[in-house]
Amino acid sequence: MKKLFLLLISMAFFYGAKAQDLKSEVSIDASPLNAYYENSNLPAALMGYSEGGKMHWYAYGPSVWGEKDTVSEDHIFRIFSMTKVIATVAALQLVEQDLIDLDDPLDELMPEMTTIPILTQEGKLIKATKSITLRHLLTHTAGFGYDFMDYQLQAFDKTDWNYEDLPRLFEAGEQWNYGTSMDWVGKIVEKISGENLETYLRKNVTGPLNMNSTWFNLPENLKERVVSWGTRNSDKFQEYPRIPTTVTEYNAGGGLYGSPKDYLTFLQCLVNNGKYDGGQLLKPETVEMMFKNQLPEGMTLNFGIHEMGLISTMGKFPDQADVHSFGFALEANKDEMTRTNGAGYWAGIANSYYTIDKEKDLMIVYFTQFLPFNDEVSHDFYRLFEKQVYSSFRD
């Protein structure tokens, strides 16, 4: 019996899978996850889900590549664009306080943003005729893009360009295009609140939720918990410096560090209609609005070009049959086999992902930490984990 016990323990360490929360009777079949990881060359992956307020974790590989520890839910990752929904909550708090309206023109409040010209497809710069609103920014319909996802912005001559962002690509409200809109949302929060974004979030979002591993500038005592990250080049990984440097500008579009446990805590608050132990982050009606399509009828998700070194799964994320709300996309594909229609999802550029299903009281997070975005092996691992979790709820 003792030998059998030791054998089982050894198998658990071999597969690198950390046991789920033993306080819950709900569990998933981890054997497909174990097999997938062993047959991949991923340096590490951490995934978890929460149901009924209980968290369950599955860990593969070390926190520092090449070491012998196992990554955990308390290690700290660069969450990149998973920052966006946290900043969205901050902005919606200001809406609830009547400090700004979703549909107020921002010309007077943010002239440094609204005066940025539009770059036409013919390469001409023209003045915008429509005002940008907070709704446009929160739904990525303000016209801003990312240069790494757009050839035209990459080719744009920035000589003597004195604006704080690259040109917009279209008039507000005309299209959906992923870009720097949420960076501007962060600046709006700072201007209205009179506080920098780090301070505002600690007071009003991450602090109240005890997300004490989530910062733009990590306290010194947390830096040792930051995981490795780098770039995949074919089957090889090149590691970047692990310890973050201090920033003086706070990027609401992708600047936060945080732990998987913190992020599940945040998603749980949204599923709980904004309620947390000791308070209310957002009103229930505001949270409900986040789970409704906010795009005009017929507008589709255009995630950018595929030829920029963004791996083949770029066509799968996001699904162009889906829609977008405030902070994340919503599943709307009638042929989707895993997620519930209406479930929210999004990602971070270093191959991290989340799913938030309010209907099922279910939240899922998945973290790897390397570029380029939407690596096929990592994306498929996330989707496999998602499938295993959903399957356990259907059984």
Image (cartoon, rainbow, N blue to C red):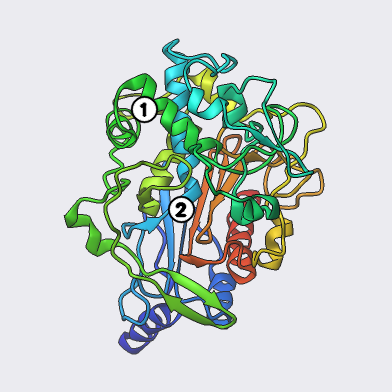
Query: As drawn, is 305 to the left or to the right of 42?
Result: right
| Camera sees residue 99 | yes
- Give the labeled residue for mark 1: 190
Q: Residue at the location (36% across, 51% down)? A: 257
- The residue lying toward the viewer, choosing from 360 and 98, is 98
**Considering depth in this image, is 110 or 317 the residue closer to the camera?**
110
Q: Is residue 36 above or below residue 110?
A: below
Q: Are marks 2 and 1 in contact (CB under 8 Å)?
A: no
Q: Quadrant of residue 244?
A: bottom left
Q: Quadrant of residue 326?
A: top right
Mark 2 nearby-residue class (10 Å; few <14, some 14–19, many ≥20): few
Judge left or right: residue 221 versus residue 111.
left
Label 2 to label 1: alpha-carbon separation: 44 Å
Tell me: residue 18, above or below residue 244: below
Q: Position of residue 256 (x, y in %)?
A: 38, 47
The percent coordinates of residue 266 (x first, y second) are: 41, 39
Residue 187 picture location, percent across and down: 42, 31
Q: Residue at x 26, y 52 (%)?
A: 246
Secondary structure under the numbered disc 2 in the rendered image: loop
Residue type at the position of mark 2:
Glu
Of all residues shown, which one is farthest toward the bottom?
3
Q: Is residue 90 visible?
A: no
Residue position for label 2: 25
The quadrant of the image that shows the N terminus is bottom left
Find residue 287 and name its label.
none
**Element at badge 1?**
helix
Residue drawn 27% across the image and 33% down it: 199
